[in-house]
Amino acid sequence: MSDKKIYWKDMRQAFTSSLGRFLSIFSLMMIGAIALIALKVTGPNLEQSAQNFIDDQNMFDLAVMSEYGITEDDLEDIKSLDGSTVEAGYFTDLTEKDTTNAVRVFSKPDKISQFEVIDGELPSKDNEIALAPTMQDDYDIGDEITFEQINDNNQDLLKGNTYKVTGFVNSSEIWDNESMGSSNAGSGELSGYGVVTPDAFDSEEYTIARLRVDDLRGKLYTSDEFSSKQKDLQKELEDKLADNGERRLNDIKSDIQDQIDDGKSDVKSAKKELKDNESKIKDAESKVEDGEKAVEAGLIQDPNQISELEKSKKDLDKSKKEFNDKKSDAESEIKDAEADIDDAEKEKDDLEEPEYTVYTPATIPGSDGYSTYDHAATAISSIGNIFPVVLYIVAAMVTFMTMTRFVDEERQHAGLFKALGYTNNQIIAKFVLYGLISSFLGTIVGILIGNYFVAPMIADVISQTTVIGETDLFFYPTYIIMTLVLALISAVLPAYLIARRELSKEPAFLMRPKPPVTGSNILLERISFIWERMSFTQKVTARNIFRYKQRMLMTIFGVAGAVALLFGGLGIRSSIAGVSDSQFGEIFKYDLIAVEAEDPSQDAKDEVDDLLNSDRVKEDLPVYQEATSQSIDGVTDDQDVTVIATGSDDFDQFVKLHDRDDDEKINLSDDGIVISEKLADLYDVEPGDNITFKLEDKDVEAKVADVTEMYTGHFIYMTDNYYEELTDKDFDTNAYLITLDNSDSDETEELSEEFLSLDGIQGVVQNTGLVKVLDSISGQLESVMLILIVISILLGVVILYNLTNINVAERKNELSTIKVLGFHSKEVTMYIYRETIILSIVGILVGLVAGRILHLVLLDVIGNEEIIFDPTVTTEVWATPIIAITLIIIVLGFLVYRRMKRINMLDAL
């Protein structure tokens, strides 16, 4: 009959006598749980927090805009979309007075895309406004803000220019407080927004129609189901509005024609009135002349009649004077009216059919923050599918070896208990319970740290500049169960399997010490010219390395895993960090693009030329530029593609086209187009293949001559001749690539505002705005990778400590014997630690190769459809893991030395 008291005492001693082993398993499982939980829950937390914001603010699902506004007839067609709630509104871009700050002013919505009040309240009068939180440094509640109307399109859209600030609000459509998107006001980049009452606008047509659709409710905005349904609804709405452009054009032409007809009628009436008055004067002149002739002939002698004749003559002279005075004014007015009619005729003839564009939250103007936030959440989820897997595999291998060593150490105790009548299950329970408690405690602590500390830290990096605010924490049972199951597989399962295998033997066999691993000849011994030149200690080290094969493999793969994770994290940081400088320093050499207005007057062109020829502009290049939206097979969303055509040989002074692999310069030729890397990936083409894309409102098929290095955005470059070949149109420029003499952000913004203020320019794109977006994405991912780098280093420390500890404990008797033979503590340390050093070197080399592979895999998953990161890494990425592992080995070496000094030589007996 077994004694339970002895059993539980032995159980307690198993924990108290091996605290180092317990803490090793605890730490490995904790680090694994931290990484898995933090990376797995952060993405869903971000997405669900954003979904709550979307639901709370009733953010739109689809929106419709048109160049000529949205009419009531348009709204009826939009409302015909089944299950939709539609709300129309206004917005316009203005400039703060005496600044270059562009501000987008919205009308206050009733239900859809509401504003979240941060401080104060929403406006209730048509002279009140609530501003973005970013403007709190410049304005207080109660202050007044004055705008400058920037062009004819906005001149009458708002009734007033000065508004009283009533509060500060978050927009549900502009998510990022730093990168708000481009604008046609100010510097060309939004610096804020505001909301006024609808009564503050003065327009017959709405600017935008927003929709909420019932079929999308209850679906997470990032889910495939939501995206697929949203795209179907977008297509359905586009089909419903397919004829609205033609109808709207006809209506506008009809209105203009009515005005022309009215004008012609007024001119005709004015001419008739002028002619009638002239005829009346001529009739009066004729009568006066007849009277004078009658007086001269003596036919009229009556003094009264003569007096009446004199009076009529005076009245005629007065009427003639008045007529002549007014005739020139009337003729001038008629001439002006006819000129207006001619202008109206030209305007009518020049009118183009408006395009009704259906936007989603990811494509609407100002959606930079939405896209950046979504990309960051997706990237972290993708990293969470890879990084923790590698980490857990490494941790599980080391934990497996730790538990194997534990069973071996307790082998004699197990034999004794078996001889005393304890069942195999009772003895196995000791090992299972040890693995269960150590792994579960570590896992639970890791779950808590990962969920309540690391995950919010990562999420805060991403959401800190957005309107989403602090990320909410949610409970994910699946990930917790997954983590606990991994702990069971890593620590409990090996304990059970190994203990069961050992307990299959007889008690007498188990109570005898486990025989040492027998040595054997190794491959190196057969290479005599090397083996014979090795010292005694070197030969012993070589034999011992292969004598303990399990420990050898675990050390190599343990170190390799830590190095691979560290390399992967550092590599991603390196790849991300250089993207902005490479894109906007080496590839894009220009500072901004200024797009010409359609059919500008000669005076407007001269104004543009004057600014281009000023000292502030270093050089400029006229090009043809077209921003198109391309549908690509296999890609969910339409892609924004910029097409640039040039006939200049100086194009490489503005855009560096080159091959990534060999940095060889790419010249534009008449044989085909040059496309950016990511676009080539999406089309799945290489040089020599053909692609189809939209150009000048028609689909064209072009040959891909080359693929150029490019990190963000999609670009197609071609010569003027190839443009003419594709479009059958004469080449003409419509934009300028501009390099500034002083390209700092302030000067770029000021000059952008000056270009936008010209009638000959309709839009400006600054590189500084694109840099902000790219830097925002890069900064978020860099911070996340820094956290993962720290976790990787901690893993490396725990792994090397654990393996070193196992190595020393496993060979305690051998080391005691070595010391008895006269070896000093330092020599004994090197006797055993030399193996660790050599195996770590091998592990580092394997880890660098594995890390490079991991780095490329991570790069592939964190990029999106518009961004590609630099696959090359700096020297520091290769050197840092080597230095980190070396430092860990050195520190652990001192600990091993101290332990060797305390070895009892009597253990050799």
Image (spheres, rainbow, N blue to C red):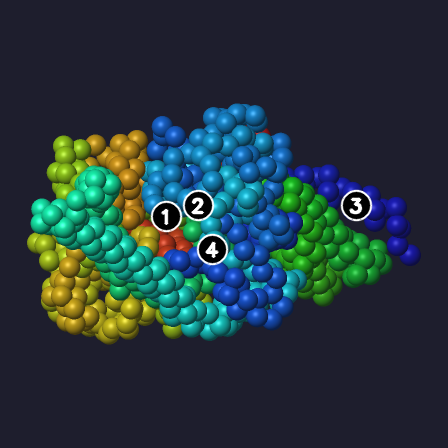
Mark earlier in primary sequence (2, 4): 2
Tag 3–tag 2 contact (CB < 8 Å): no
Query: Residue 347 appears at what percent x and percent y?
Result: 28, 59
Residue 494, picture quadrant? bottom right
Q: Is residue 781 left or right of residue 762?
A: right
Q: CA distance from mark 3 to mark 1?
A: 87 Å
Q: Which is closer to the viewer, label 3 or label 4?
A: 4
Of badges 3 and 1, nearer the viewer stands 1
**Position above or below: 598 against 76:** above
Graded by Cα atoms within 10 Å as few (under 14), some (14 to 19) or many (20 or more), the crowding at tag 3 reads: some
Report helix, strand or loop for mark 2.
loop
Disc 3 or 1, which lies upstream in sequence? 3
Residue 48 at x, y percent in the picture: 62, 52
Secondary structure beneath disc 3?
A: helix
Viewer-closest of 815 and 810: 810
Q: Relative to 703, is 94 on the left or the right?
A: right
Q: Whole-Å distance between the Cαs marked 2 and 4?
A: 10 Å
Closest to the observer: 544 or 306?
306
Q: CA distance from mark 1 to mark 4?
A: 12 Å
Amino acid type at image mark 3: Asp
Check disc 4 and report its element: helix, strand or loop.
Answer: loop
Marks 2/1 in contact by CB < 8 Å: the verdict is: yes
- Residue tagged 4: 205
The type of residue carrying mark 2 is: Leu
Q: Which mark is residue 157?
A: 2
Mark 2 Cα-neighbour bin, 10 Å: few <14, some 14–19, many ≥20: some
